[in-house]
């Protein structure tokens, strides 16, 4: 792996290591041959294996990614491919660097997280995401790994950009015979955002739509997709009940269709989803115009016959019929409708009329309290009709006679006029009653909305909080009902207030103690973390002001000392001195301007040291010296980007060290069974510390050492007895058994009477 400051392709200077797992290493580099030395993103392919098939496959995938980036890089929210080259048996891709924040850091974590998204923010995110997917799919590709780490909110304009096309796949025709057998696609994606069909290598364009929809749901609910409930009967995700704030039904429908379990039930293209999203945003941005009330007719005999005849008229004839306006008097006046004018029965209205057509339904009450009917009309009520003579309406004399009065049956024209008058009076009466009901309902609604005391309670709670009345503030904020518009803000404030108050209570005694001991620098440093709460700030402000006045004469010396340490590359010591200089002192402004420079230099130095230690640790691990590897990794400070990776490696190497300790212990047991106690002890000495086998190894060393001494004693006794037997035979002397026993006892001091040298030989063998 190249180290920091390495110059790749005689052009790209590495300044930061983003990821170094030995396979797909990534770096930030400076383009030294470009004016201003802009940053760029470098990806390195460096496989540890020498298997030619693996290398060939990896190179092929790497080439596909480069080709895809070259084709897609003309989009302003996809990083451009700048360079592709091979150096020192490694392949490199150089891309445009996107400065910004990953979506993973912007998503809420849990329902009570302060980062929760509003519905409008979610809609804007979906609009940007779907437009990106639409572009990629039109170019013939599927991203296949839409996830929080793959979207970056660009710092310069706040737009979301899509990165990492390592898992990109071409779009294939699904209806080609043998498609499943001919295509091989690995399900490479991020856990939780992988659509079901991608598990079988059958990625489709709407697989990306599925993952994008889950990201939007996570933004609204604060829940990772793995934590969402799935309906056991349908397999669909039940998410809208988990939303932090109420979500409109249109957005619920949109997202639910994006994340349907079966790909056939989702949007089939990003363009389709984008069109529906734009319609949704258009409807939200357009003011809602209240439509006129649709008044249902009272079915008199004439109207019943008329509606039957009207239903048979072709729409084209209705549309071209000349409308005749009917003038109505105000309901507040007692003047009857003019009887001199000839009024025709009501008929279906032209499509261009602002009044909804009257549909033939069964007779109902003039007052319809349903939500669809209770709508206040904006335009004045205008009625259009068609002459009854054109419609050939014939009244039913029997029904007419029984329905009205026992007078003689009126003429056809007179019946038409009278029926129309009754109908219009009923319609106007129903309209008046409906208007009164709606007016009363709106008045009640306005009265209810003005009764929301939540904002006032929250304001009072804030005042109490900053006045030091913590318990009162918490009680007031908790009393805000969940229907109040201030409820969400109150919940957020409660969480923050509790944390800040506890922090202030903990930190204040430290400030007080330092002030009493006249440790002025400690006073300033201990006061800095105290949150901005008026009650606590009023307490510490006089102490901080006095401490600042006491420290001010020393700050120029601290500044010069910091410069000296910076010249010696001791950026940590320089930063400690600069950060001691408090606000309000002569050297403060200069110190503040110098801190970013020293922090950047310190970060680069730390990363260079971390990279060196990491490389040495890998080499030690390859040599199976896991103790040394762990020792090197533990020296890497926590402020480096590789720290989290280092902790993983430490856990891995400790596990391997435990395995090594157990293996050494087993090997020592085998040597001991063969009476090779010296070799067993040497192996036990190699068992690493901080392993479960280490304590047992120490115990076994003592045991085997004792056995070794016993073994030597037995060997010594055996040698003496053999020498004595040889000497007796040479001299021809006869030594009785009792004398021999005494001699043996005298030599060893441990053998009992009746000692037989053959006993030890038999035992040892």
Image: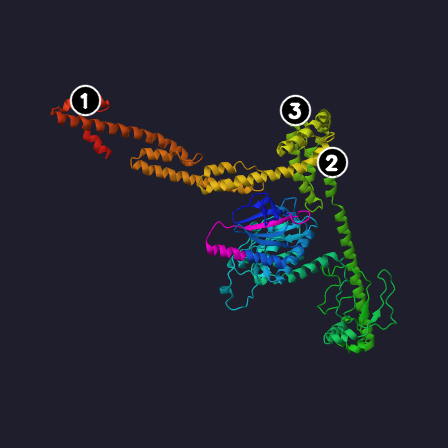
Question: In front: mark 3 or mark 1?
Answer: 1
Tag count: 3
Which quadrant of the figure has residue 573? top right
The x, y position of residue 296, in whole percent, is 75, 66
Residue ID at (19%, 27%):
723
Could you tell me which quadrant the C terminus lies in? top left
Among the two numbered marks 3 and 1 on one chain, the one whose residue lies closer to the N terminus: 3
| Magenta-colored span | 32-61
Quadrant in which residue 417 is drawn: bottom right
User: Which residue was labeled with disc 1?
Assistant: 743
Where disc 1 sits, the SS reads: helix
Q: Which residue is mark 3?
A: 513
- The residue beneath circle 2 is 463
Callout 2–callout 1 Cβ contact below 8 Å: no
Report the Cα–Cα distance between label 3 and label 1: 83 Å
Answer with mark 2 or mark 1, whichever residue precedes in sequence. Answer: 2
Q: Nearer the viewer, residue 547 or 338?
A: 547
Colour pattern = rainbow
């Amino acid at each position: 792996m190249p180290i920091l400051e390495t110059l790749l392709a005689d052009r790209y200077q590495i300044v930061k290591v983003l990821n170094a797992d030995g396979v797909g290493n990534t770096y930030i580099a400076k383009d030294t041959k470009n004016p201003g030395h802009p940053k760029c993103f470098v990806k390195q392919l460096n496989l540890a294996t020498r298997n030619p098939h693996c290398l060939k496959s990896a190179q092929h995938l790497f080439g596909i990614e480069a080709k895809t980036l070259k084709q897609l890089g003309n989009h302003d929210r996809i990083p451009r491919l700048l360079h592709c080259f091979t150096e020192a048996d490694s392949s490199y891709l150089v891309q445009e660097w996107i400065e910004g924040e990953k979506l993973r850091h912007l998503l809420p974590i849990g329902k009570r997280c302060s980062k929760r998204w509003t519905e409008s923010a979610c809609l804007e995110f979906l609009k940007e995401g779907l437009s990106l997917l639409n572009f990629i799919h039109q170019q013939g590709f599927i991203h296949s790994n839409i996830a929080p780490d793959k979207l970056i909110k660009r710092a310069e304009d706040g737009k979301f950009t899509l990165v990492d096309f390592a898992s990109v796949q071409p779009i294939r025709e699904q209806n080609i015979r043998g498609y499943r057998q001919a295509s091989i696609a690995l399900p490479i994606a991020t856990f939780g955002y992988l659509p079901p069909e991608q598990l079988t290598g059958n990625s489709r364009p709407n697989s990306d739509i599925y993952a994008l929809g889950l990201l939007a749901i996570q933004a609204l609910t604060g829940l990772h997709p793995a934590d969402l409930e799935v309906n056991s009967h349908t397999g669909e995700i039940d998410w809208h009940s988990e939303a932090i704030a109420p979500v409109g039904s249109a957005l619920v429908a949109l997202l639910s269709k994006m994340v349907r379990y079966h790909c056939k039930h989702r949007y089939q293209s990003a363009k389709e989803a984008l069109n529906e999203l734009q319609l949704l945003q258009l409807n939200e941005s357009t003011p809602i115009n209240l439509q006129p009330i649709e008044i249902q007719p009272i079915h008199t005999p004439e109207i019943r016959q008329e509606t039957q005849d009207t239903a048979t008229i072709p729409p084209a004839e209705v549309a071209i019929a000349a409308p005749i306006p009917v003038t109505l008097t105000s309901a507040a006046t007692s003047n009857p409708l003019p009887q001199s004018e000839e009024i025709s029965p009501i008929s279906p209205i032209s499509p261009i009329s602002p009044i909804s057509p009257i549909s033939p339904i069964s007779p109902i009450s003039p007052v319809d309290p349903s939500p669809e009917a209770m709508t206040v009309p904006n335009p004045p009520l205008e009625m259009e009709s068609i002459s009854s003579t054109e419609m050939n309406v014939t009244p039913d004399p029997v029904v007419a006679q029984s329905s009205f009065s026992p007078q003689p049956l009126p003429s056809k024209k007179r019946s038409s006029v009278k029926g129309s008058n009754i109908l219009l009076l009923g319609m106007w009466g129903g309209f008046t009653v409906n208007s009164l009901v709606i007016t009363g309902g709106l008045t009640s609604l306005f009265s209810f909305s003005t009764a929301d005391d939540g904002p006032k309670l929250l304001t009072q709670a804030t005042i109490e909080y900053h006045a030091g009345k913590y318990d009162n503030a918490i009680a007031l904020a908790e009393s805000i009902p969940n229907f109040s518009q201030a409820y969400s803000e109150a919940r957020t404030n409660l969480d923050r207030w509790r944390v800040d108050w506890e922090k202030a209570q903990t930190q204040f005694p430290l400030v007080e103690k330092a002030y009493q001991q006249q440790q002025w620098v400690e006073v300033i440093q201990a006061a800095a973390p105290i949150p901005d709460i008026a009650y606590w700030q009023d307490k510490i402000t006089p102490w901080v002001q006095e401490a600042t006045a006491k420290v001010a004469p020393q700050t120029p010396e601290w500044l010069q000392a910091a410069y000296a340490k910076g010249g010696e590359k001791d950026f940590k010591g320089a930063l400690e001195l600069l950060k001691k200089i408090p606000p309000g002192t002569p050297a403060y402004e200069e110190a503040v301007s110098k801190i970013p420079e020293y922090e950047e230099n310190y970060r680069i130095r730390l990363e260079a040291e971390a990279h060196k230690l990491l490389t040495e640790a890998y080499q030690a691990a390859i040599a199976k010296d896991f103790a040394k590897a762990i020792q090197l990794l533990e020296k890497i400070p926590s402020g480096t980007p590789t720290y989290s990776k280092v902790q993983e490696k430490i856990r891995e190497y400790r596990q391997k060290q435990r395995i090594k300790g157990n293996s050494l212990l087993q090997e020592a047991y085998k040597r001991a069974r063969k009476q090779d106690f010296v070799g067993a002890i040497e192996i036990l000495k190699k068992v690493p510390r901080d392993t479960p086998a280490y304590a047992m190894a120490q115990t076994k060393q003592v045991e085997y050492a004792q056995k070794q001494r016993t073994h030597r004693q037995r060997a010594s006794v055996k040698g003496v007895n053999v020498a004595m037997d040889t000497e007796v035979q040479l001299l021809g002397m006869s030594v009785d058994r009792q004398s021999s026993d005494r001699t043996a006892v005298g030599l060893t001091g441990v053998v009992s009477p009746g000692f037989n040298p053959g006993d030890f030989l038999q035992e040892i063998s």
